[in-house]
Image: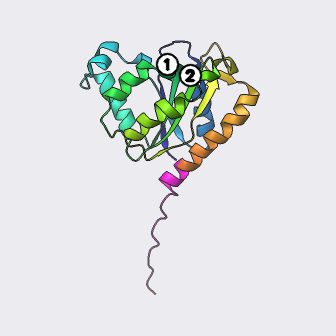
Amino acid sequence: MATVLAVSGSPSPTSRTTGLLRHVGARLAEHGHRVVPLDVRELPAEPLLRADTRHPELARALDLVTGADALVIGTPVYKAAYSGLLKALLDVLPQYALAGKTVLPLATGGSTAHVLAVDYALRPVLSAMGAAHVTQGWFVLDRHISLREDGSATVERETDVLLQPVVDAFAAALARQTGPAPAEPALAVRP
């Protein structure tokens, strides 16, 4: 079982990106992984923008990144790139904060014109931060995600059918990364 940090880079309190991350997190939990949410918008703005890593909430966020085996990073796409809020968090992290980690990049947006943002904007940054493996990312159109009152999301069936193999491949990469639990050594019994 891996600990997966689900990072939402959406500034919106009613975020389809965050809803998508919760949806993906539920699927990962079905695979036996522990999923921990981190909504960047809930971090205090001033310490985040000043990169004040001594601030308790920011220090806690950095500890979550450090302690995670893997990350799912979700962002809305604005002007063909990931959100400025996500960038603020990534800028605060140490250069190789993702070393040894598997990362699944996800993006949401209003138009298929931004579909390449996952591979041309987000993936290079994640790789530069030392991610051991950046799995195939996925872009979901906003209109294919419906939010419920409790903040959870429903992903349109046709979209979910395409998303599931991406999440399952990420889960398989985690299984390879963490490997099976070590067997307990057998006790030698002398006759």
Magenta residues span 174-188
Kind of residue indicated by mark 1: Ser
Q: Which mark is residue 10?
A: 1
Quarter of the figure with residue 99: top left
Query: Would you name the residue on which mark 2 appears?
Result: 17
Residue count near mark 2 (Cα–Cα under 10 Å), binned few <14, some 14–19, many ≥20: many
In the image, is 141 to the left or to the right of 81?
A: right
The vertical placement of 14 against 181, above or below, is: above
SS for callout 2: helix
Residue count near mark 1 (Cα–Cα under 10 Å), binned few <14, some 14–19, many ≥20: many
The residue at 68%/23% (across/down) is 154
Q: Are marks 1 and 2 in contact (CB under 8 Å)?
A: yes
In the image, is 90 to the left or to the right of 147?
A: left
Question: How far separated are the C-alphas under marks 1 and 2?
Answer: 6 Å
* Secondary structure mostly seen in the magenta stretch: loop
Sequence-first disc among 1 and 2:
1
The residue at 70%/35% (across/down) is 162
